[in-house]
Every structure is written in structure tokens, then in C-alpha cells.
Image (tube, rainbow, N blue to C red):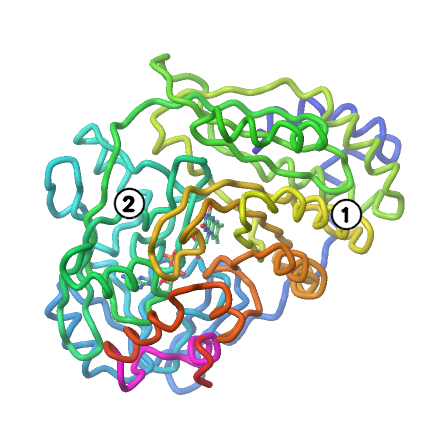
Amino acid sequence: MISRRTALITGGAATAVVAGGAGVVGLAGRENPEPPSPPSSDGKGHTLWRNWSGIAHSYPVQRAAPKDAAELATLLKTAPAPVRVTGASHSFTALCATAGTLVSLDAMSGVIGWEGDQAIVAAGTRLGALGPALAEKGRAMANLPDINKQSLGGALGTATHGTGTHLKAIHGDVTALTLVTPGGAIIDCDAQRRPEVFNAARVSLGALGVISQARLTTTPNRRLRRRVWVEPFEESLAKAEERWATHRNFEFYAVPFTGLAANIAHDETDDATENNGPSEDDALLNVLKGLKNVLGFSTSLRKAAAKAMLGGVKPETAVDEGWKLLSTERPIRFNEMEYHLPAETQLAALQEVVAVIEKHRPDVYFPIEVRRIAPDDAWLSPFQGQPRGSVAVHAYYRDDYQFFFALIEPIFRRHGGRPHWGKLHSLKGADLAALYPHWTDFLEVRRELDPEGRLLNPYLKSLFGLA
Ligand SMILES: Cc1cc2nc3c(=O)[nH]c(=O)nc-3n(C[C@H](O)[C@H](O)[C@H](O)COP(=O)(O)OP(=O)(O)OC[C@H]3O[C@@H](n4cnc5c(N)ncnc54)[C@H](O)[C@@H]3O)c2cc1C
């Protein structure tokens, strides 16, 4: 969002305003202790599985990495249940936790064919590896999320998305897929062949079977110009709709307790590559954490310091191929809640979220991410039926995140939000049935494909109202 260069340029101002010259790096040092880690083994020889942020874990009795769909089919039919498939384990919830079998598709990776400009991609492929593989053919994915560590199957599983009014979440570009079921069937489906499976499986939380491969629409591999700038939050709010309408990709980050927002736009260009250095967003986070630690007792001082530091920041630009520019690194671990709101309620919900954080949670310093996503028709897609705007709240992995549920989620729910499937939320069967017109259709396909519930772990049972 903002580079170390930017933070350093403004560091002098911070030093002057904050604690009479203590310096930004020193300020960031005071933090909560490391949360306790679960043991690396359960004492019976079963090794720990843990998600990226560290809040979900389990001890699978069996692990497997099948090499093809036939091997996967046998495994799903015979391995100890619950059988869960994981990609990069970057989801924040316990979707992949299992005391049974944990399946990885790391051995089923790569672009395995082309049909015109559509790529057939093995579902274990990491998004970061897909970029260069498609670029060899002059093609690219239309859009990418903030990071590219996810597997294709995992990204589809939770409706992973980027930002752009005319750009769908990744599953919106899937035109066919192969699903291997717990009964050992290998089903090829698309809009004509087994359409009910296609509609249910494009976003399925790994609850119908395991996708072994998918056919993806691609776009020409164009260079994009990225522009990043900081301005008053009110200005970002006032101009957001116009910016979503005009930029290929647009998002902004509201920075609580500062009155500021960082904006990021990407647009196609024929200009030469320039200035795409490593992403160093953690520099800004450290600055914000420092302000919180030292000036958390006074919102007005914190605002003044942040304005002095960030207010005069010059816009930054970079030009490169989209697959190199759209995703960046996230070296600082956090927990996250993200809801997808109807476009017309998104900004009102955002304003309430910022107000409630500034009123009740002076310890929060992570910026709040605001994106827009085009609609699609997958049954469990949060973007099913209408364009949606996402609002995401983060907490450093050592910090409390219960305020997501107590303070933030009620706002999202009041504004008609649907939760990101891979991020924290508390919704269950009846709540979800009210948000998704095809909820019972999905459950029916699930029952048909997995009548014995071999894929259901406790988290999914409770989500589907089957616990
Ligand atoms: C730092 C960070 C940044 C993020 N940025 C974004 C972002 O910008 N946009 C966004 O939308 N999300 C984002 N996320 C969330 C992330 O994209 C999702 O949680 C995604 O599902 C993770 O992919 P994964 O490969 O790790 O999947 P996992 O977490 O391993 O699995 C996710 C789900 O998919 C299922 N699954 C995995 N493979 C298959 C398969 N082959 N067939 C069927 N089901 C399968 C799993 O069983 C599980 O239910 C971010 C997460 C982190 C930690």
C-alpha cells in the first residue's frame, strides 16, 4: 500500500511529532506476547497442521498427495474421514482442520492444456506459479487477490477475489471443471453437462469433492500502471464510486485514527516497465503501530502525527505486467473478517466500521480494506446475483480479534453483507440460507455427492446446520 521509501521520507515528521525524537522503529516495539503454539505432534505421531494465521489447527492421522484424478478418487473413497483438502492453508477458519485425512494437491500442478485462449489448469497450481505459465502464451488471469500464495482449488473453494467493478472473483472465470467425489466418481461439468454440479462446485468449501482441474478464461497479458496516493478519508469516500467506474482496478484503505486513506488504482498501459520494487507495506504498519503504542491515549494527537507523517506523501507509480503487480507480499501475520456488501450499502457500512473502531478500540491500527467485485452466478458465491463491495478488518496475529464479532459483524449484517468463506464470521445454516437463494440446492447436491458425510469436519457440519 505504501513503500518503505514513503515511510522513510515521512519518518522525520514522525520523529518530530512523536515522543520528541524517539524514532519510528523504536516505537513499534511494544506488543502483545506471542500466542501459545500447539505442540508440533499430538503424542501419537501425528504431525500438526496449522493455518497461516495460526488460529486453526489439527492432527490428521493420514496425509496424502495424489498424483492424478484416479489416485485421488481411490483416496477420497477409502482414506479415514473426515477427508479435507488443503491448498496453501491461508484461510482463517477451520475449513481444512481434520483428525482424519488431509489431502494436498501439490503434486497436481501446472497448466495442462489449452482450448483456444482458455487454460486448463491443475487445481493444485499456486496462483503465483500460474502467472508466469500463462504469460508464456501471452495470457493472464483477469484479476488477482492481494497475495498469490493460494492454490487454484483453494481460491475457488472460498470465492477468492481481487478488486474491479468489471472483474469477477476467480471462480467467475471458470468455464468447466473436474470434480472427484468421495464416492470415487470423476465428474466433468460445465454450464451444459451436470449444470447443478457446476453451479454448486465453483464455490464449494471443499464440501462436494475435490476439484482436480478447471478451465479458465484468460485475458491478454497487459502491462498495468499502478498509482498509490494518500488523501483525506472523506475525499476517498466522495470519489470512490467514480474511481471504481473509471479504473480497471481500484481499492482504498481507510486508516483509522488518522482521517486519511491510501488509494490504489491500476490501469492498462503500453508504457515501459518502471519502478516495481519489492512490496514493503509492513513499513506503514509499523509506523501505525508505533503511533498507536505511543499516542493511543489521545486520538487527536494520533491524528496530528499521522497527518504530519502521511499527509504530504507524494503519489507513487509502477508499471509492469499485471500478474507481477496485482498481488504483493504480506509478511506481517494477521487475522481478518471480510464481508461482501451490496454496492449501495458498502460505503455507509465502512463509515460505521471506522466510527465504531475509533470510539471503542484505540488498539486497532491495521487499515480497513475496501474493494468492489463484479457479479457471477455460482450458487455459494458471495457475489451471486449483484455486484458487491467488500470491507475487510484486520488484527495483528498477537492481538485480540473478538471485536470483529462483537462490534463489526453486526454492522456488516445490518447492511446485508455476506461473509468471505475463508475469513472469520459467525454465521450458520439459517443465517446463510437467508442470504443465499440457492442454499438448499447446494445442500441437496452435497447430500447427493457425499451421502455419508465423508468430507464433513466439525466446522462444516456446524456451518451447514448439521451438527
Ligand atoms: C495474507 C492473506 C491475504 C489474502 N488476500 C485475499 C484477497 O485479496 N482476496 C480474497 O478473496 N481472499 C484473500 N485471502 C483469503 C484466501 O484467498 C482464501 O482463504 C483462500 O481460500 C486460500 O487459498 P488456499 O489455497 O490457502 O486454500 P485453503 O485455505 O487451503 O482452502 C480453502 C478451502 O478450499 C478448499 N479446497 C482447497 N483445494 C480444493 C480443491 N482442489 N477442490 C475443492 N476444494 C478445495 C478447502 O477444503 C477449503 O475449504 C487472503 C488470505 C491471507 C492469509
Q: Quadrant of residue 335?
A: bottom right
Q: Position of residue 428 (x, y in %)?
A: 52, 74
Q: Residue at x 15, y 73 (%)?
A: 73
Q: Tell me which numbered mark, 1 or 2, is placed earlier along the sequence.
A: 2
Q: Position of residue 384 (x, y in %)?
A: 40, 53
Q: Mark 2 near ligand 1 (CB under 8 Å)?
A: no
Q: In this image, 27 relative to 134: left or right? A: right
> Mark 1 packing: few (<14 Cα in 10 Å), some, or many (20+)?
some
Q: Position of residue 188 (x, y in %)?
A: 13, 61
Residue 173: image tag: 2
> Mark 2 packing: few (<14 Cα in 10 Å), some, or many (20+)?
many
Image quadrant for the N terminus? top right
Q: Residue at x 32, y 47 (%)?
A: 172
Q: Amino acid at mark 1?
A: Ala
Q: Quadrant of residue 123?
A: bottom left
Q: Is residue 452 magenta?
A: yes
Q: Residue at x 44, y 78 (%)?
A: 41
Dot 1: what SS? helix
Image vertical order of residue 76 relative to residue 295, above or below: below
Dot 2: what SS? helix
Q: Residue at x 36, y 29 (%)?
A: 322
Q: Position of residue 288 (x, y in %)?
A: 71, 40
Residue 10: image tag: none
Q: Amino acid at mark 2?
A: Asp
Q: Which residue matches tag 1? A: 355
Q: Which residues are magenta?
A: 450-463
Gap in angstroms between the C-alphas marked 1 and 2 = 36 Å
Q: In this image, 203 relative to 135: left or right? A: right
